[in-house]
Amino acid sequence: MSLNVTILYGSVRADRQGIRAVRFIDRQFRVRGHKTDVVDTLEYRLPLLDRMYKEYDGDAPEVLERLAQIYRASDGFVVVSGEYNHGIPPALKNLLDHFLEEYFYRPSGIVCYSAGRFGGVRAAMQLRMTLAELGTPSIPTIFAVPHVQDVFAEDGMPTDPAFERHVKGFLDEFEWYANALKSARTPSMPGTHIATSTECGVGESTETASGAD
Ligand SMILES: Cc1cc2nc3c(=O)[nH]c(=O)nc-3n(C[C@H](O)[C@H](O)[C@H](O)COP(=O)(O)O)c2cc1C
């Protein structure tokens, strides 16, 4: 089944390298027949979080509205994350925090990378917690990329063709979860009415996110 895959990338540095991993993974999904949207924080230039999307109550800035539309049509999120001081890059966290319900009942997959040999896995562990809280739990397999500046060309082509074999397990697993949740999503899922409700369940996240505790 063809999926809508949303790829989130959160480095706005002039010399950023992770864009290579974004281009690599984007191509992999498209080759498999999926539609992709790359949400690049350098293009979208979100301000630091003031209000979450839902807090604008139908009057959100155009950039957030555009993102919300992409998210609502999405079957899953692939989060491409570097590691800044063993944590999540700030522009990525800022992007993630603007939304909540729009992630619900869709899986996420983590592609992490770094300039060194650990491949950004320490940031990936923090991302797992954040993504679970956002209602887009991450699939078990992480695709970690050490030495990102060396293993992909600027256009995302791997310098070692074996990379395309290595990523297969991640892609297969992401597809499985995205297809499974796509078939299971219905209008009557618990928590889908959260935006206008103060009930608990999945909605506890909403309470916390809007400062209720
Ligand atoms: C503020 C900052 C903190 C960093 N901290 C880490 C780190 O904790 N671990 C690591 O492996 N690399 C670290 N690096 C190096 C990054 O892995 C490398 O610069 C990578 O290319 C960053 O992703 P980007 O180019 O897409 O922004 C850091 C880089 C920056 C700019």
Image (spheres, rainbow, N blue to C red):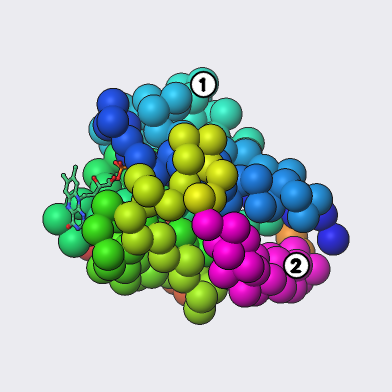
> Within the magenta stretch, is there residue 135?
no
Q: Is residue 171 left or right of residue 67?
A: right
The residue lying furthest to the right in this view is 1
**Residue in the image at 68% along x and 52% along y:** 29
**Is residue 23 shown left or right of residue 27?**
left
Name the quarter where the C terminus is drawn.
Answer: bottom left
Picture coordinates of residue 79, whole percent (x, y)? 47, 54
Residue behind label 2 places its C-beta within 8 angstroms of ligand 1: no
In the structure shown, which secondary structural element does the residue marked by tag 1 occupy?
Answer: helix
The percent position of residue 89, horizontal first and vertical second, equals 26, 48
Q: Is residue 213 left or right of residue 85?
A: right
Please state the horizontal and vertical placement of residue 170, each as a whole percent of the image: 59, 69
Other-residue count near label 2 (Cα within 10 Å), few / some / many at <14 / 14–19 / ≥20: some
Mark 1 sits on what residue?
62
Q: Which three-letter amino acid code belongs to the residue tagged 1?
A: Glu
Which amino acid type is shown beneath numbered disc 2?
Answer: Asn
- Residue lying furthest top: 62
Q: Say the numbered circle drawn on residue 141.
A: none
Of callouts 2 and 1, which one flags the residue occurring earlier in the amino acid sequence?
A: 1
Question: Residue at the front extreme?
Answer: 160
Residue 209 picture quarter: bottom left
The reply to whether discs 2 and 1 touch (Cβ–Cβ < 8 Å) is no
Quadrant in which the N terminus is drawn: bottom right
Q: Give x and y (percent) for residue 200.
A: 44, 71
Mark 2, secondary structure of its residue: helix
For this rendering, which residue is in front, 118 or 66? 118
Region rendered in magenta: 160-184
Q: Which residue is mark 2?
A: 179
Against 155, is 30 above or below? below
As drawn, 169 above or below 1: below
| Snapshot quadrant of residue 192 | bottom right
